[in-house]
């Protein structure tokens, strides 16, 4: 068994076109992601799944492995599945899906999601972290997850606030009542990827616009690990030019520039 991280990268982006190739640090944004994943020491191989030859060309000088995938994919898992097929991975291999716009992902999070998958027999695993500021739970841009009582299996994901504190005092009385923010890092058993692609889209998936709900609605299990430190997964991904400029400022500060 090997652990392969696949980083989907596409040129199109509504709020920040061509962001994966933004290179004011001297390295394309997606290359920073590759570097962080390699720092985890949890994977045997990192491959960028690109939708354009230009991405492959930009990463050549870093000797980063790139596989070209179709530009027509409905979600990241579908692109990951095609890449895994093209790479000829074995059914017992583990595939980690790391978003191509998260240059500050914590390497420890990559280790955690692999460990969450391997501790049981679920076909898929992900991560969560309890929220210190519960006001964040009100945002539909922040995905929440509820779990089993042992916090080892996901029950549901939502853009709505879950759980809903009906009487307004549960969070104060019960530390485990705090909402859990879902972190969009996934690990899969290689054999499950073609199964996922073959599953029909589901009502809740389409309503919430959350691809992982397709897995639960079809009766499959998602293992989850809850991180203790709210900062354990690193900073969120880059969606806008302004966020990229903030990342650039932090990077320059770390380099002493």
Image (cartoon, rainbow, N blue to C red):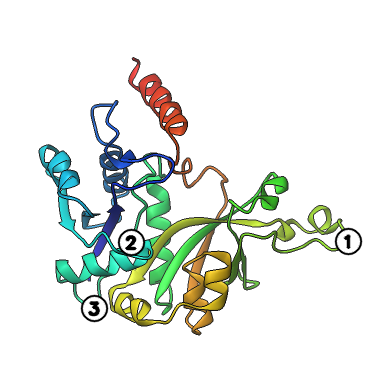
Contact (Cβ within 8 Å) of mark 3 with mark 2: no
Marks 1 and 2, how far apart at CA: 40 Å
What residue would you read off at disc 3?
Answer: 91
- Badge 1, how many Cα within 10 Å: few under 14, some, many 20+? few
Which residue is nearer to you in this view: 20 or 132?
A: 20
Which residue is nearer to you in this view: 81 or 179?
A: 81
Q: Is residue 153 visible?
A: no
Badge 2 marks a residue whose secondary structure is strand
Q: Looking at the figure, which quarter contains the N terminus?
A: bottom left
What residue would you read off at disc 2?
Answer: 96
Numbered tag placed on residue 167 in the rendering? 1
Residue at the image point whose x is 67% and y is 60% from the top: 160
Which residue is nearer to you in this view: 205 or 235?
A: 205
Q: Earlier in the sequence, mark 1 or mark 3?
A: 3
Residue 235 vs 98, above or below: the answer is above
Residue at the image point whose x is 53% and y is 42% from the top: 231
- Badge 2, how many Cα within 10 Å: few under 14, some, many 20+? many
Q: Is residue 247 visible?
A: yes
Q: Earlier in the sequence, mark 3 or mark 2?
A: 3
């Amino acid at each position: 068994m090997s652990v392969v991280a696949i980083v989907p990268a596409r040129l199109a982006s509504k709020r920040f076109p061509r962001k994966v190739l933004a290179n004011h640090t001297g390295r394309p944004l997606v290359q920073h992601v590759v570097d962080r994943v390699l720092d985890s020491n949890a994977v045997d191989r990192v491959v960028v799944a690109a939708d354009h030859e230009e991405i492959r060309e930009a990463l050549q000088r870093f000797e980063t492995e790139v596989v070209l995938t179709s530009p027509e994919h409905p979600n990241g898992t579908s692109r990951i599945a095609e890449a895994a097929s093209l790479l000829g991975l074995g059914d017992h291999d583990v595939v980690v899906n790391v978003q191509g716009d998260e240059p500050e992902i914590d390497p420890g999070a990559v280790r955690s999601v692999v460990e969450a998958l391997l501790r049981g027999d679920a076909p898929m695993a992900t991560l969560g972290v309890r929220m210190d500021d519960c006001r964040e739970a009100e945002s539909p841009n922040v995905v929440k997850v509820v779990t089993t009582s042992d916090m080892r299996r996901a029950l549901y994901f939502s853009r709505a606030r879950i759980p809903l504190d009906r009487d307004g005092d549960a969070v104060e009385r019960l530390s485990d009542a705090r909402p859990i923010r879902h972190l969009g890092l996934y690990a899969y058993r290689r054999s499950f990827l073609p199964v996922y692609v073959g599953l029909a889209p589901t009502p809740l998936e389409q309503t919430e616009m959350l691809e992982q709900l397709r897995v639960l609605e079809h009766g499959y299990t998602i293992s989850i690990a809850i991180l203790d430190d709210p900062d354990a997964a690193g900073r969120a991904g880059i969606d806008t030019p302004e966020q990229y400029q903030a990342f650039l400022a932090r990077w320059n500060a770390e380099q002493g520039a």
